[in-house]
Amino acid sequence: MEIRKLLKASSGAKNLKFGKIIHAHLVVSNQISRDRVIERNSLINAYSKCGDIASARLLFDRMPKKNVVSWGSIMAGYLQHGYASEVIELCRYMVKVDKLCPNKYILATVLASCSNCGLLDEGQQCHGYALKSGLIFHQYVKNALVYMYSMFSDAKVAMRVMNSTSRSDICTYNSVLKGLLDQGDLRKASYVLRRMVVECESDDWDSITCVNVFGVCGSLKDLNLGRQVHSRTLKTGVDCDLFVGSATVDMYGKCGEISSMRKVFDGLHSKNEVTWTAVLTAYLHNECFEEALKLFLKMDLQNVVPNEYTFAVVLNSCAGMSVLGYGNSLHARAEKMGMKDHTATWYQPPLHEGATSLDKAFVSCSEAPFAWTSNANPPTNPTPSPEP
């Protein structure tokens, strides 16, 4: 029992060296014989969590007898380190060869792997098994299903899964809200948001929740609710999160509250190109073209590298102010940075020197998805590793 506790501590601290010392002690003291499945499972779990998936797999392959926890530990390790396709193959082998049925942990891991690999058919088969076995009533499995359907842009089925059992937690709502926002279904997003406020305590809200709610507020131009959520992030300290800060800026910008937007932006401890672009976009949409160009110069002075969406916003601002020369120089700079073929920064200079505006400029920044809406996904459905 003490050895298992030590291995669990090693896993929690991601201390691979300590884990190897314990492993060596078990070998020398002959405490890891062929039939000691529990100890081997603990070692697999420790190696996986410490990043040594090769050693974990070696231990796993050498086990003459494996149980469901053995399979779950190695699958969770592969998923954690980005080998989702390996998880699918291991599950198939476990069912066909070892004749073992997935438990709630394994099923949640396999569903997350289906999401990562884009395997909808396999995910639907897992959904069928969850219904047949009753595992859908476990929150881990339900959240994994909701997340998977949201990832596949099937918010309708995601909501059906959410409503299939009585209990939903913040992870469930995060996935559904994200899926509805991506599809632009603001009516349903507003409905789900109201349900979430009733069913989930405000203390349960995480950074992903705040980003999603700010997205709903901005799209609906609900400044009152946006301010309430902003106040909540200030009280809980979530406002320090980079993605939450960017979402707050974007929300105020879409609601036309430019002064509040700039105040939030100036107060952020850290900023990246996404944050800067969010402010620039807000200035553009509110026709503050000069402010956008001034801020872009400040961005340059702070050595923040613009992306294609940044250039799209600034080129549109140039068009708004009819500054042909600066627009041409920005276009040349974007091409030099390898963005010539990017739709968001496509630009055609005027056909004659007497043109007074960038009437031939075309940028699609108003439809450009911000990076924070796709990269903050953090995993909305963290899959738990089975405890050995």
Image (cartoon, rainbow, N blue to C red):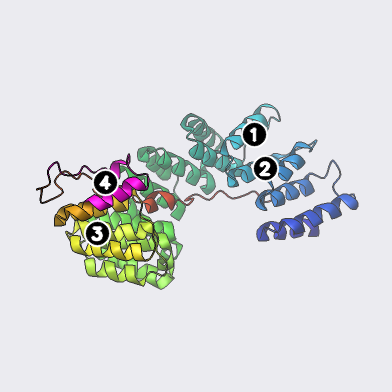
The amino acid at mark 3 is Ala
Side of 114 relative to 78 (left or right): left
- Element type at marker 2? helix
Disc with the residue nearer the chain's start (4 vs 2): 2
Q: Position of residue 67 (x, y in %)?
A: 72, 39
**292 vs 237, nearest the viewer:** 292
The amino acid at mark 4 is Glu
Whole-angstrom CA distance, mark 1 to mark 2, is: 9 Å
- Tell whether label 4 touches label 3 (CB within 8 Å): no
Q: Which residue is mark 3?
A: 282
Disc with the residue nearer the chain's start (1 vs 2): 2
Quadrant (top left, top right, bottom left, bottom right) of the N terminus: bottom right
Which image quadrant for residue 13? bottom right
Of tags 4 and 2, the one toward the viewer is 4
Q: Residues within 10 Å of mark 2 (few under 14, many from 20)?
A: many
The amino acid at mark 2 is Ile
The answer to whether residue 118 is above or below residue 269 is above
Side of 215 relative to 385 (left or right): left
The answer to whether residue 20 is above or below residue 291 is above
Whole-angstrom CA distance, mark 1 to mark 4, is: 41 Å
The amino acid at mark 1 is Leu
Q: Which residue is mark 2?
A: 74
* Numbered mark located on residue 367 in the image: 4
